[in-house]
Every structure is written in C-alpha cells, then in structure tokens.
Amino acid sequence: MSTEVISLNHVWVKYNQTPVLEDINLTVYEGDFIGIIGPNGGGKTTLLKLILGLISPFQGNVKIMGRRVCSGRQYIGYVPQVLEFDQDFPVRVADVVKMGRLGKRRLLHRYNAKDEAIVNHSLEQVGIVELRNRPIGQLSGGQRQRVYIARALASEPRILLLDEPTASVDYKIKSSIYELLKDINQYITILLISHDIGEILTYVKSIGSLNRRLLYSEKDQLTNNILERTYQCPIDFIDYKVPYQILPQYSCPFYKKND
C-alpha cells in the first residue's frame, strides 16, 4: 500500500474573513505526480503556502509525512514561481544550488564535502553539471529554472512542490522541463501548479481543478463539466492528449491574456 505523504482534511483558509480555500480534502501518496490547475485568484498558490506552513488553516488539518506541518515540511523541496534578481550579481550556479543545503546543517557551520557532493549530484540530476561555475545571470530562462529545481533537490526532499515551473520559458523549453520532472518523479513525489492545462495533462498522473474548492480526478477523467465548474465559463476541451484548451476571453471572468 502506498505511503501517504500529504494529507489535507476539511481545510478552510480565510483572508480577512473571506474564504480563499473551502473544505479542501486532498491525499497525496508516495510516487504521485499531481497537477493543480485553476483560475487566477482561485487559491492555487495559497494551497502551496498552506502545505509549506507559511499560512495556517482557519479550520481543518494538514499533515506532511504523517506529521504536523512544522516538522513535516523538512521533507519538502520547493521551487517558487519566478525569481527576480540582479543579473549582474556575481553568484555562481553551484552557490545557488548550495542554498538548498542551508536547512541541513547547523547555523554558521561551513559547507562540507557531503554538501559539495550533493550539489554536484543535484546538478547532474537536472543535466547542467557543466554549468556549475557559470554566473547565474548568464543563463537562459530554461537553464535558470533547472538551477532552481536543483536547489530544491539539494535539500534531499521526499516531496517536490513547484509553483508555475514553466511560466517564463518558451514551449520547447516547457516540454524539456516537464520531461525532467517526469524523470524526477521516479524517486520523488511531485505536486505542481500550472496554467498549461494541455501540457501538464501529458505528464501528470492525476489532476486537481481548484477554484476555492478542489475537484480531483485522474487525468483521463477530466471533463468539460469539471473545467467549467472551476473556471466558471465555457471551455473548449476535447481530450487530455490535445496540447491546448481554449478559455474564451469574451465569456470567462477569470481569463487573462498570456495567463
């Protein structure tokens, strides 16, 4: 029987007494590869913050590896959406990845040989070990995203959370990132947020459709009805093998161009 790694039971989150997540139930098992889709403002990033322990539920409970979030989150590696930085800042790829080791050693202790080995291994896992000494400002968007994934892997996680991992890269690079995540999923559980409905359906094992409430299904059971209930507008959806779905701008209150 698969091990439960994330569990949310009847979870509610409120901002200024306004519900943002309503009665969320979600169980993630070891080896899962889950995509979460939904409109802007639907609570997707809030869901990740909840799992990471950055916010607390108004009601319900969250468990990571069977533990309270404060102790269970040590098993999570996190890749945030878009990182803005000064591209002239002289930081090397290896230094960025090494940041993933900060939670694995005592305060003010130097990095050791084990840390260096894990950094190298993490770079090998994402296919950019040859870039370890390159200033990160010289990398392409796709290469930088691999660096951030390597940084998360350097924490030796059991679970990988990603917030819009392909938001700033072109279609070809998107596919390569998802192929990378598919390989990583052979040994790490993955939960990611994405607006690329058709793209993630090619790779994930199951999908959650979130707009305050979560509708969860296997990817081949995702229907027009589920999408329309989530996006609250007509959806031109054929099947999960089609790379794109259409969210008509004229009829969808959550539609944003280039979203």
Image: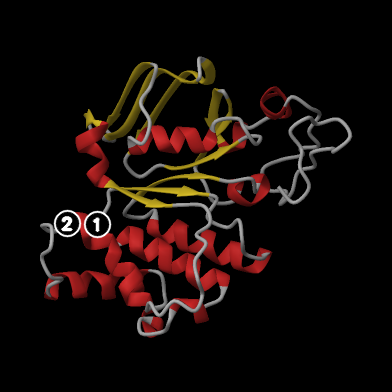
Q: In this view, does 116 lie to the left or right of 28?
A: left
Q: Nearer the viewer, residue 186 or 81?
A: 81
Give the residue displayed 62% in from the left and 64% down from the top.
Answer: 169
Residue wearing tag 2: 104
- Screen quadrant of the N terminus: top left
Residue 58, quarter of picture: top left
The answer to whether the residues at label 2 and label 1 have Cβ atoms under 8 Å apart is yes
Q: Is mark 1 on a helix, strand or loop?
A: loop
Residue neighbourhood size for the residue with mark 1, other residues' Cα within 10 Å, grouped as few (<14), some (14–19), many (≥20): some
Numbered disc 2: secondary structure: helix
Instruction: Choose the circle earlier in sequence order: 2 or 1.
Output: 2
Residue farthest to the right?
250
Which residue carries the number 1 mark?
156
Q: Determine whether 101 is above or below 117 in the image.
A: above
Residue at the spot 49% in from the left edge and 43% down from the top edge:
205
Q: How crowded is mark 2: few (under 14 residues within 10 Å), some or many (20 or more)?
A: some
Residue at 35% from the left image edge and 69% from the top image edge: 96
